[in-house]
Image: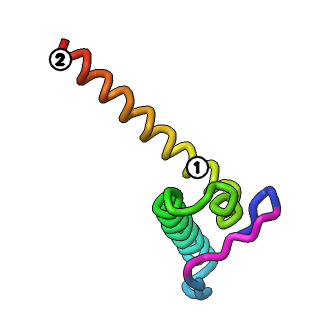
C-alpha cells in the first residue's frame, strides 16, 4: 500500500487471487486492517523505549500521527481521572 505522502506500507502477508475480484478485495481490506493494527501496536509499545526523533523515522506518517493521538488521549484521560479522584476526596 502506498500513502498519499508516497510512503510504502507493506502488508504483513501476501494475498492470493482466488474466488474472484470481490473476494480478493475483501481480503485486501482485511489484511490492510490487520497490518495497520499490528503496526500501531508496535509503535505504541516502542514509543517509551526510543528517542522521539528515531521513533518518528521508524514508522509511516499516519501511524506516527495516530499513535501520538492515542498516547496523548491516554495521558489526558489519566490526568482527568486523577483530578477527579482528588476532587472526590475533598
Instruction: Examine the image and state in which quarter residue 16 appears.
Output: bottom right
Instruction: Examine the image and state in which quarter residue 24 appears.
Output: bottom right
In front: label 2 or label 1: 2
Residue 89 badge: 2
The residues colored magenta run 6-12
Residue 42 in percent (x, y) is at: 50, 66
Q: Residues within 10 Å of mark 2 (few under 14, many from 20)?
A: few
As for residue 8 lying within the magenta part, the answer is yes
As for residue 74 lying within the magenta part, the answer is no
Examine the rendered structure and indicate whether residue 8 appears above or below residue 83: below
Residue 12 badge: none
**Residue at 23% from the left image edge and 24% from the top image edge:** 85
Pointer 1 residue = 66
**Residue at 55% from the left image edge and 84% from the top image edge:** 19
Real-space Cα separation, disc 2 to disc 1, in angstroms: 35 Å
Instruction: Examine the image and state in which quarter residue 14 appears.
Output: bottom right
Amino acid at each position: 500500500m502506498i500513502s498519499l505522502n508516497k510512503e510504502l506500507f507493506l502488508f504483513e502477508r501476501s494475498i492470493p487471487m482466488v474466488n474472484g475480484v470481490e473476494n480478493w478485495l475483501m481480503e485486501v481490506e482485511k489484511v490492510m486492517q490487520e497490518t495497520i493494527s499490528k503496526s500501531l501496536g508496535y509503535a505504541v509499545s516502542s514509543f517509551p523505549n526510543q528517542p522521539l526523533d528515531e521513533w518518528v523515522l521508524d514508522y509511516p506518517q499516519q501511524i506516527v500521527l495516530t499513535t501520538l493521538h492515542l498516547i496523548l488521549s491516554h495521558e489526558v484521560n489519566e490526568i482527568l481521572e486523577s483530578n477527579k479522584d482528588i476532587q472526590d476526596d475533598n
